[in-house]
Amino acid sequence: MTGPKKRLYIKTYGCQMNVYDSELMAQVLSADYTLTTQPEDADLYLINTCSIRAKSEEKVHSLLGRLRFLKKRRPQMLIGVGGCVAQQEGERLRQRVPHLDLVFGTHGIYRLPEMLRQVEDGGAPVVDTDYVEQFQIPPRRHWPPGQGKALVTIMQGCNNFCTYCVVPYVRGPEMSRPSGEIIQEVQNFLASGGREVTLLGQNVNSYGRGCPESLSFPQLLRELAALPGLARLRFTTSHPRDLSAELIQCFAELPALCEHIHLPVQSGSSRILSRMKRGYNRDDYLQRVRQLQAVCPEIAITTDLIVGFPGETEEDFQETLSLMQEVPFDNAFYFKYSPRPQTRAATFPGQIAESIKAARLARLKEIQDRLTRASHQRLVGQIKEVLVEGRSKQSTSQLSGRLRSNQVVNFTGSQELIGRLVQVRIEQACQHSLGGRALGCAGSC
Ligand code: 5AD
Ligand code: SF4
C-alpha cells in the first residue's frame, strides 16, 4: 500500500510560459505529491523563476534568502529552483544558496522525479541544466473542474536574439511541439468542458519553422479552430516581423480566433528598433496593424514597450509616444530597459541614467492609461460575451472574466457560472477593468 501523498508548493514568477511549466511540474510529480497553498506545510518547495529583467531576478533572490529560515525550522523540506534563473546560474546558484536541494533548468521538468530521488538517496544537492534535443510533452489529460481556459505550449526557445533579451540564452533554441500532441491536448481539454485555449511560445508565428513535415502556425490555428466545442482561441507572443498575410487572414476567417493580438513593438523609433535587431521598422509595424484592423475591425491590439534602451534620445522616445497614439493600443506593458547578462545591448555605449528611464516610463504610463480608459469607455453600453474565470480579486461577491478582446469584466453572478460563457452588458469603465451586468448564458454554455 502506498502512503499519503507529500505536499508540493510552487511559487511562480514571470510569464505565462512559466505558469504552464509550473502546471507541468505539478503533473509530473502528481504520483507522489499533491499541491498545497500553504508554503510552511510543504515537503517540497519549488520556485519557478524569471530572469527577463534584473528586478525579476532580485525577487527570486530575496525569496531564497527568506526561505533559509523556513529550512532551518523544517530541515526535511526540500527546496528546488527551476526556470530561467536556474538555467542561467546553475552551479553558481547552488554554491551561493547552501539551503538549496535542487537546481533544474528550463528543459528539466520531465527529469524532476528522477532528480528528487537522487536528492533523497544521496542527500546532496543536484544541479541539472541540460538541454534536450526534442520538445515533447505528453498531452495533458486532466484540468480542475470549472476551468474554462487553458494554456497550451506549442513551442519553446527563441532564435531571434533581440539585443536586449536574455530568453535565447535561458530557453535555448526554438523547438516546436509536434502538432499531433498539441491537438490531442486541446481535444482532452474540450472533453473536460473547457472553452478557451491560449497557445504559448516565445515567438509563436515561427511555429514549425525548420521542420518541413510540421504544420505552419496558420495551419495549426485552422486545425484547432475547427475542433468542435472550442469557443475561443488565442495565442501569445507573436513577433511583428513574422506576422504573415496568411496569419492575418486567420483573423478574418476563423470564428474561434479571438479579436485580440498581443504584438510587442518595443519602440516607435526605427533607429532604436534596428539597434534592438527587431527586423522591422516603425512603418512595417504600422502597416501590419492596419492590415489586422482591415480584416478584423474590432481587434484589440496590445503591446510591450521598453524605455531607455541604450542610445535612446528624447526624439526616439517621442516617436514611441506618437506610435502609441497612432495605433492606438488598447493596453500595454511597459518596462525600463534592464541590462541582462550575455546580451549585446548590455555592452552598448549610451546606457541611459535610471532617473531618465523612470521619467520616461512615467510619461508613457500617463498616455497609455488615457488610451486604456478610452478603449474601456468605448465598450460601455455594449453587450459582450464573457468567459467567467472565477471570483473577482477586488470583491469576492463578484465574478470576474474576460471578453474575447481580453479586457477584464467584473459582475454579480453565481458560482455555477465559473468556466462558462455569459452575456454581459458593460456598464462601467475603470482603469484596469470593466463593470457589467449578466444577462444570461451565451449559447451552449
Ligand atoms: N529590459 C526591459 N524589458 C525587457 N523585456 C525583455 N527583455 C528586457 C530587458 N532586458 C520586455 C520586452 C518583452 C517583454 C516580455 O519583456 O518588452 O516583450
Ligand atoms: Fe526575446 Fe526577441 Fe526572442 Fe522575444 S523574439 S523572446 S524579445 S529574443
Image: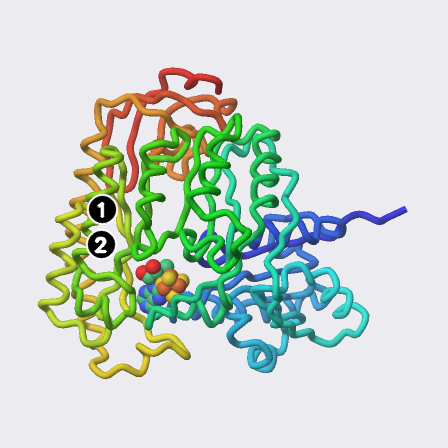
The structure residue drawn at horizontal position 37% and vertical position 52%, both measured from the top left corner, is 238
**Ligand 1 located in image quadrant:** bottom left
- Asked whether disc 1 touches disc 2, contact meaning CB atoms under 8 Å apart, the reply is yes
Is 254 in front, or is 385? 254
Q: Mark 1 = which residue?
A: 289
Image coords of residue 359 (percent x, y): 16, 66
Residue 35 in the image: above or below residue 251: below
Q: Quadrant of residue 116?
A: bottom right
Q: Residues within 10 Å of mark 1 (few under 14, many from 20)?
A: many
Q: In the shown orientation, is residue 350 left or right of residue 218? A: left
Q: Secondary structure at mark 1?
A: helix
Q: Quadrant of residue 242?
A: bottom left
Q: What amino acid is labelled 1 in the image?
A: Val
How are the colours assigned in the image?
Answer: rainbow
The structure residue drawn at horizontal position 31% and vertical position 83%, both measured from the top left corner, is 347
Q: Quadrant of residue 267?
A: bottom left
The structure residue drawn at horizontal position 69% and vertical position 74%, both measured from the top left corner, is 126
Image coords of residue 175 (percent x, y): 53, 60
Image coords of residue 143 (percent x, y): 61, 38
Q: In the shown orientation, is residue 31 left or right of residue 261? A: right
Image coords of residue 54 (percent x, y): 38, 71
Q: Residues within 10 Å of mark 2 (few under 14, many from 20)?
A: many
- Does the image show residue 407? no
The structure residue drawn at horizontal position 56% and vertical position 64%, both measured from the top left corner, is 106
Q: Secondary structure at mark 2?
A: helix
Q: In the shown orientation, is residue 101 left or right of residue 32? A: left
Mark number, residue 285: 2
Q: What amino acid is labelled 2 in the image?
A: Tyr
- Does the image show residue 200? yes
Residue 97 in the image: above or below residue 370: below
**Looking at the image, which residue sits at the far front?**
212
